[in-house]
Every structure is written in C-alpha cells, then in structure tokens.
Amino acid sequence: MKRVRAVEPWIEDPLVRFVTEAGARLTLIMTPAGQVLAQHGFTRAVDVMAAAALGAAIVSSTREIATTIGEGAFKALNHQGIHHGIFLAEMSTPRGPLLALVVYGSESSVGLVQLFYEDLVQELVAACPGEEPARPVIAADFERDLHKSLASLFGR
Amino acid sequence: MSLVNFTTREITCKIVYYGPGRSGKTTNLQYIYGCVPESRRGKMVSLATRTDRTLFFDFLPLELGSISGFTTRFQLYTVPGQVYYNATRKLVLQGADGVVFVADSQARQLDENLASLQNLQFNLLEQGVDVRTMPTVLQYNKQDLPADLILSPSALDAALNFRDDPSYPADALTGVGVFETLKSISELVLKKLSQESPA
C-alpha cells in the first residue's frame, strides 16, 4: 500500500485506518483554502496541491450555490465515473473546518467510503489537539536562500 | 494563510494574481510555467471558458526549494478579472498570503484598474483582512504597447499605488517584469512570515 503522508501528525493514524477500511485509492485532508494537511496515494507534492486546489474550489462553489438556494450547506458531494468515483466532504474539527477528498475505484463504493468517512471524522475530532501557539518559522535572513531558489527556477 | 509544517519543515504559501479582465494575470502564470523546469512545478490547471477567459482560476504550484531550512512551495492562483465573476474571485482570495495586482497600462483601462483595486480591498475586508496588512506588489503590464496608448509607470504609481507598494513595469507576453514581480511578492510574503514568528 502507498504510504500516508501527514503534515499534521495527529491525522496520520485515522487516515491510515480510513484508507485501509474504505479501500480508497487517493485521499486528501485539507483546509478550505486548499492547503494540504495529509494525503495518501499521490507521488508528487505539486500534484497534491493541484488536486487540493480543485477540491477546495468545488466545495467552496457548491457551498455558495447552497447558500443562494437557502440550503445552508451540502454534507457531501459524490461524482461517479466508470472507473473512479470522487467523494468530497467538509467536517468540523477543533482546528476549524477541514475538507476530505477521496478517490475510489471499482474495489470500493460510495457507500463504503461514506460509512468509513463517518468514523474518520469522529477519530479526527477526537485526535485533534486544538490550536497550537505560534512558533518561530523562518529566519529573518531568508533572502539569500530565496534569491538562489528563484534564480535557479528561472535559469538565471 | 501559510501552512507551516515543523515536523517535515515545509512551508506552503498562496499568492493570488488579481486585476481587471485581460490585464495579463494568466499570461504571467503561463510565462512562469514555461520557464520553470518540470521537476520544480506541477501541472498548470486552468478553469477557463471556451474562449480561454478565466472562469474560476488558474493554478500553478511551484517548488522553490529550501529556504532557511524549510522546503518552500508557492501556490500561484489567478482570479477571473471580469466584473460579473466576483463570487469566484472571493473564493480564490480566501487564505491568500500575498497579492500581485496586475494592472493594464493602457490609458483607457485606468477606470477598470481602479475598480478592480477597490474590489480587491472590498473582498479582503469582507474576509476580515485589512488590505494594508496584505503583502502586495503591483505590476504594470503591457508597457510594450505604443507610448501614446499607455500610461507610464510613474503615472500608474500616482493613480494606483496608494500605499507605495513595490511596482514593476512588465510585458508578461515576453516575460519582462514577470520574474521581478514574483521575486518581490515572494520576499514580502516570507518577510511577513518571519516577522510574525521571529526566529
């Protein structure tokens, strides 16, 4: 099985269980702005970011449509294709709202994903440590590294 | 808001290219996409209409490399510039760490530039963000057009750059000013991050 990678360590165990039980091929846990907190099944970080951006956009735009028609919010979205299905849902945690994007194949089903998604949400809410205090991030003299990185990006 | 992972020492920042319709926001991302080696960028995602006008956003993920010991990634987004797509502009603006305002240098587009700047301020305020605290860079695009059609960078500074933000003349089609703009907004975003949590 492909490895689960979690930016926030408390997400890892619940996500491993979910992926195993639901038979998900790809899974992303992200913020509503599309920042990835944990993923399973992707190979390149930049591909994860694109999937997260699109998933967050779908949830955001659907929420706006829901608001427009007085629905409040949709609990989850599902798109079923011939070979793959995608399941998108928003959950509330002590860290604020998070989104889950799950891609499943013929070895699973939307019912199975939904069933174990409920468990995933409960486990994440229980494991979530709440807001952490601010910590030092980057040194004030980051400019040299940044200039070097950008110059190599643009071949200068 | 930047996502910082202390365990794996990773930073991900979101930069939004804002501005009126046809000012060159997508062209900036296309130029960057064309310049950057494949190993350092993801696929450029464009949600556009059949006539290639941005409908929702363009998205380009970049791997900057190691900065102060953190693997740093930037997510570049554009918003749809056309006035009636404000709902989607607001969605894309959520969680932005920095804004590049791409202005159209043509004299006849000045009102559109001003309206878009006001729209940016309004949309940020609606999300509880004071535009004065948002790292912002202005780019005066299409400076390659005949001089009688465009305003000079100093005239555009006088008309648009109320907060004395960094500004760059550009011709995004050929890449003039694109790199300088990205470099400048990257510096501002990371500087804010270092000031918020001094190491």
Image (cartoon, helix red, strand yellow):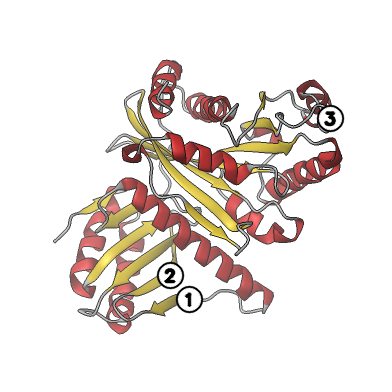
Task: Decide if residue B74 is on the left or right side of residue A102.
Answer: right
The answer to whether the residue labelled 2 contacts the one labelled 1, judged by CB atoms less than 8 Å apart, is: yes
Classify the position of the C terminus of chain B by image quarter. top left
- Answer above or below: position of B157 versus A19: above
The answer to whether marks 1 and 3 sit on the same chain is no
The first of marks 2 and 1 along the sequence is 1
Residue at the limit of the structure toward the front, as seen here: B146
Q: Is residue A62 above or below residue B164?
A: below
Q: Nearer the viewer, residue A140 or B64?
A: B64
In space, the residues marked 1 and 3 are separated at their CA atoms by 46 Å
Q: What residue is shown with label 3?
A: B159
Q: Quadrant of residue A87?
A: bottom left
Residue at 74%, 32% (x, y): give it.
Answer: B145
Q: CA distance from mark 2 to mark 1?
A: 6 Å
Which disc number belongs to residue A65? none
Across and down, in percent, residue B127 comes to 66, 50
Residue identified by numbered label 2:
A89
Is residue A129 visible in the rendered image? The answer is no
Q: Amino acid at mark 1?
A: Lys
Residues packed near mark 1 inside 10 Å, few (<14), some (14 to 19) or many (20 plus): few
Of the pair B190 and B100, the residue shown nearer to us? B100
Residue B70 % position (x, y): 34, 30
Q: Which amino acid lies under the numbered mark 3 shown in the image of this protein? A: Ala
**From the viewer's perspective, is A95 left or right of B114?**
left
Residue type, numbered disc 2: Ala
Q: Are marks 1 and 3 in contact (CB under 8 Å)?
A: no
List the residue tagged with mark 1.
A75
Tell me the crowding category of disc 2: few under 14, some 14 to 19, or many 20 or more residues within 10 angstroms, Cα based.
many
Spatial CA span between label 2 and label 3? 44 Å
Instruction: Say if A26 sits above or below A83 in the image.
Output: above
> What is the quadrant of residue B53 in the picture?
bottom right
**Res. A143 visible in picture:** yes
